[in-house]
Amino acid sequence: ELQLNYYSESCPRAEEIVKEQVTKLYDKHYTTAISWMRNLFHDCIVKSCDASLLLDNANGIESEKNSDRSFAMRGFRYFDIIKEALENECPNTVSCADIVALTARDGVALLGGPKIEMKTGRKDSKVSYAAEVDTLIPNHNDSMATVLSRFHSVGLDTEATVALLGAHSVGRVHCVNIVHRLYPKVDPTLNPAHAEYLKHRCPPPGKEKKPVEYSRNDLTTPLVLDNMYYKNILDGKGLLIVDQELTTDPRTSPFVKKMAADNDYFHHQFARALRILSEINPLLGDQGEIRKDCRFVNTH
Ligand code: HEM
Ligand SMILES: [Ca+2]
Ligand SMILES: [Ca+2]
C-alpha cells in the first residue's frame, strides 16, 4: 500500500531533496513547475502512476513521449537531475514514479496552488504503453462525454475532473491546437475580443512567421495556479474545445461556477483530485522495480 513518508527509514531526506531540486529548478526555469503537473497527468492516466511515461526509445521500448498526445511536453530532462540527487543520497531506493508524484506536488505549491499530502511507495514499470496513449488520454477536441467517461473510469468524479482542468490556469497552447477555432470562421463560443487576440498570436495555417507559435492559457495570472481559469472560460476565453465545453455541459458547469467564485474551494478540490490522480493503480512491492535511470528499465 502507498503510505505517507514511505521513505522515512530507507531515505529520510528523499522528499526534502525533491523539494530542494524542484525549487532550484523553478528559480532558474519557472516553466519546470508547469511541466511536472502535466507529466503526472500523462503518466498516471496511462495505466498507472508508474513512470511509464519517462522511458526512452531503447531495447524494444517505444517511448510514450513520442505519441501524438505528448505534443509539446517539456522538461523531461529535469527528471535526470532530481534522480541523480536522490541516487547520490540513497542509491536504488526512490522510484521514478514517486519522483513524478512528488515533483508535481511541489510544483503546484510553487505556482501558488494548494499544499498537497501525497503518499509514496510506487514502483516503476518495466514496460511502456506507447501504443495506447492516444486512446487513454483525451484529445483537445473530444466531447465532454468522452472526457468524463475516461476520467470516471480511473476514479476521478466530475467535480475532480473540473478541478484538474484548472491546471490550464498556467502554461500555454500551441497554435496548431487553436487555429481550427479561428479559421476560416471564428468559433462562436469564443469571446470575440479574445478571438482577435488569438488571431494575432496565431496567423492562418501556412502564414506563420515563426515555426512555433503559441498563446498563454491565462493572460491575467499566467504563472499562478488559481481559479482565473474558470473566470476565463466563463468569459469565452478557453483555448481548447474541452476547456470551453466545461461551461456548457450541464454536468460540469455548476462546478465551474462554484470554482470561479471561490479560489479556496478550487484549491481544495484540486488537491483532492491530484491525490486521486496520483494513486491510480500503483505498482507495489515486486510488481515493479526501482529504476536506476528513469529513462531505461534496469538491466540485470
Ligand atoms: C481532457 C483533459 C485534457 C486535455 C484534452 C488536455 C490537453 C492539453 C493540450 C492540447 C495542451 C496544450 C499543448 C500545446 O499545444 O502546447 C495542454 C497543456 C497543458 N495541460 Fe492539459 N489537457 C487535459 C487535462 C490536463 C490535466 C488533468 C492536467 C494536470 C493536472 C493538465 C495540465 C496541462 C498543463 C500544465 C499544460 C501546459 C503545458 C506547458 O505549458 O508546457 N492538462 N493540455
Ligand atoms: Ca503510466
Ligand atoms: Ca492563472
Image: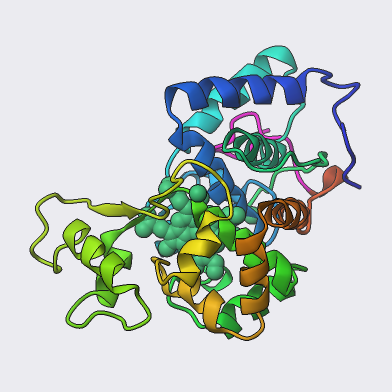
Q: Is residue 56 above or below residue 90?
A: below
Whether the magenta-drawn stretch holds residue 144 is answered as no
Q: Is residue 223 above or below residue 49?
A: above
Residue 286 is left or right of residue 27, and the answer is right
Point out the quarter of the image occupied by ligand 2: bottom right
Residue, far top = 88
- Residue toward you, 295 or 119: 119
- Residue toward you, 258 or 216: 258
Whether the magenta-drawn stretch holds residue 290 is answered as yes
Colour scheme in use = rainbow
Residue 219's x, y, as percent?
Answer: 38, 51
The rendered magenta stretch, by its main secondary structure, is classed as loop
Residue 274 seen in render? yes
Tell me where the magenta segment starts and ends, as one range.
288-300
Residue 143 is left or right of residue 266, and the answer is left
Residue 269's x, y, as percent?
Answer: 74, 58
Q: Is residue 120 above or below residue 166?
A: above
Quarter of the image where the C terminus is located:
top right
- Residue toward you, 216 or 89: 216
Q: How many marks?
A: 0
Residue 61 seen in render? no
Q: Residue at x 81, y 39 (%)?
A: 120
Q: Residue at x 77, y 57 (%)?
A: 276
Residue 212's x, y, as percent?
Answer: 22, 51
Q: Is residue 106 above or below residue 152?
A: above
Q: Residue at x 67, y 58 (%)?
A: 262
Q: Residue at x 21, y 57 (%)?
A: 201
Residue 19's x, y, as percent?
Answer: 67, 25
